[in-house]
């Protein structure tokens, strides 16, 4: 069996040979002498043209060769005389694996809307668009592992079920085996979790960072790459309830090292996709976003702006722009503010640093001003925040004070990193789907993961 991508990668190797291909019919057209089938096997956006000579095959035999049906074809690969393809197969033998009733198969035409395709998300991987997105998604996932592996980072697996409710990154999905219709109660009338599966309250993780810090303070440099769950009711084109996050954590890195790594990492991934997914990116660019390739190259070829939050707020205040949400020092910036800085003011990705401590997590390192922390958010055109990170507070005393101030409990295991051999360290979290969104130029995060989960949607 030959995969179509291999044929296009080196057609001369196959021309003049009888080969075997298998795939799904995208279209069929022709006349009473010859029929042309465009076959796609998922290995590339490019279809392979199969030529059926009706001197050899009866039209009746091809009746079930309709859009969506699956075929096995054997034939001679020849250079094509027709426009639009370089090679084609002259069918000698074929077999239909499975028919796809044209009256019922929903993907008949080209150009279904993305909204329609979201309603049949179980079949949309068979479209050109989703084929391209999913191949790019794969390449980016591979690039993530390659980048960190080549740098000597270790892939560290943090738990998906956690009893730590202090991650603070968002609302959690509870995990329980208790019978919700008949909850065991304590004397005070509260749910008695000692009878629950883990003997205590548990939930799906919103971030692997705290456990990641334990990895970094043992292995030096680690990264996580796994599913993350947030039960926030954010019905936006940039939020999912289940998404994948990459969280590197590095001992001995200060904030500037952290920024350097984040910038190098993102550029590496984008470059990897540009090099390895050129056909798919070109297809998406042609159909959805003409500026895609330029935007990707621009990000790769330019330094990101590095700017303290305080400066960013000043620029926004002085912009004279009427924002939907007011801007003032201390506010958690909204997407419109982030995008103003990136798309209109600097026209470049921006790393915003040194945020007010009140709007950031408890573990971030306090600056000498006592008001701001060493946070760094990477802001991207079209996306807004793509990375959130910081240098971590390594002083036990200061961290303990913050934990007490916020009344966080059950943090002893985490504080042990500061109790025993504490070191300066830093890390960040990249939402994998936001990266895929940027690289594919798609508009909605629900279109860059095969089976999206969001409020009121848990199909398949
Ligand atoms: P936002 O403000 O955009 O909601 P956040 O500040 O809650 O993000 P962090 O807790 O810093 O996000 O998480 C790190 C990264 O994970 C973010 O920079 C973003 O890329 C990604 N991310 C966060 N929440 C989601 C989500 N619900 N769906 C997809 N990606 C997300
Ligand atoms: Mn953030």
Image: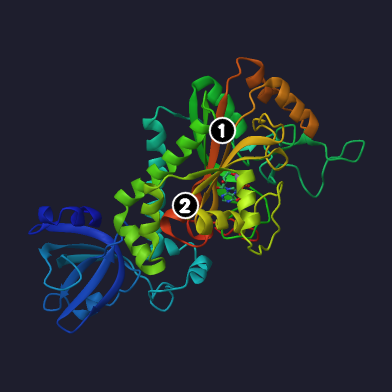
Within 10 Å of disc 2 (Cα), the crowding (few <14, some 14-19, many 20+) is many
Question: In this rendering, which labeled residue sits more in front, label 2 or label 1?
Answer: 2
Query: In this rendering, is residue 459 above or below 164?
Result: below
Which residue is depicted at the point 72% across and 46% down?
330
Disc 2 on helix, strand or loop? loop
Q: Classify residue 415 as left or right of residue 126.
A: right
Mark number, residue 158: 1
The x, y position of residue 119, in whole percent, is 53, 68
Disc 1 on helix, strand or loop? loop
Which residue is depicted at the point 55% across and 54% down?
341
Query: In this rendering, is residue 324 above or below 378?
Result: below
Q: Which residue is mark 2?
A: 348
**Image quadrant in which you'd find residue 417:** top right
The front one of 326 and 153 is 326
The front one of 164 and 292 is 292
| Res 407 visible | no
| Res 408 visible | yes
The x, y position of residue 227, in whole percent, is 55, 43
Give the CA distance from mark 2 to mark 1: 34 Å
Task: State which image quarter holds ligand 2.
Answer: top right
């Amino acid at each position: 069996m030959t995969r179509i991508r291999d044929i296009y990668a080196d057609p001369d190797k196959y021309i003049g040979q009888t080969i075997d291909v298998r795939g799904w019919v995208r279209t069929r057209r022709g006349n009473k002498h010859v029929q042309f089938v465009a076959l796609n096997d998922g290995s590339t956006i490019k279809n392979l043209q199969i030529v059926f000579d009706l001197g050899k095959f009866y039209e009746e035999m091809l009746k079930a060769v309709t859009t969506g049906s699956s075929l096995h074809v054997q034939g001679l690969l020849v250079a094509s005389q027709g426009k639009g393809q370089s090679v084609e197969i002259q069918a000698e033998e074929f077999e239909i694996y499975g028919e796809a009733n044209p009256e019922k198969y929903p993907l008949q035409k080209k150009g279904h809307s993305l909204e329609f395709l979201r309603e049949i998300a179980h079949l949309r991987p068979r479209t050109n668009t989703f084929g391209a997105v999913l191949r790019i998604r794969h390449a980016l996932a591979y690039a993530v592992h390659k980048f960190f592996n080549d740098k000597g980072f270790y892939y560290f697996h943090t738990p998906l079920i956690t009893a730590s409710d202090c991650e603070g990154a968002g609302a959690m999905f509870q995990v329980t085996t208790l019978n919700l219709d008949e909850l065991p109660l304590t004397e005070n009338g509260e749910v008695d979790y000692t009878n629950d599966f883990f003997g205590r309250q548990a939930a799906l993780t919103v971030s692997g960072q705290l456990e990641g810090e334990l990895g970094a303070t043992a292995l030096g440099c680690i990264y996580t790459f796994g599913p993350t769950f947030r039960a926030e009711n954010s019905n936006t084109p940039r939020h999912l309830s289940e998404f994948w996050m990459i969280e590197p954590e590095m001992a001995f890195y200060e904030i500037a090292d952290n920024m350097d790594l984040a910038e190098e990492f993102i550029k590496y991934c984008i470059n990897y996709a540009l090099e390895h997914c050129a056909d798919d990116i070109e297809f998406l660019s042609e159909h959805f976003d003409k500026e895609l390739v330029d935007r990707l190259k621009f990000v790769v070829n330019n330094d990101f702006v590095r700017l303290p939050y305080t400066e960013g707020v000043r620029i926004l205040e002085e912009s004279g722009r009427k924002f939907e949400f007011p801007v003032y020092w201390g506010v958690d910036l909204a997407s419109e503010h982030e995008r103003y800085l990136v798309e209109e003011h600097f026209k470049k990705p921006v790393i915003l640093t040194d945020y007010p401590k009140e709007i950031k997590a408890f573990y971030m390192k306090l600056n000498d001003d006592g008001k701001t922390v060493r946070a760094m958010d990477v802001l991207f055109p079209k996306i807004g925040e793509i990375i959130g990170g910081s240098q971590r507070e390594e002083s036990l005393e200061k961290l303990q004070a913050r934990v007490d101030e916020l009344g966080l409990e059950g943090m002893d295991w985490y504080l042990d990193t500061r109790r025993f051999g504490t070191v300066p360290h830093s890390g960040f979290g990249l939402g994998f789907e936001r990266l895929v969104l940027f690289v594919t130029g798609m508009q909605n995060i629900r279109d860059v993961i095969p089976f999206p989960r969001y409020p009121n949607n848990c199909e398949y």
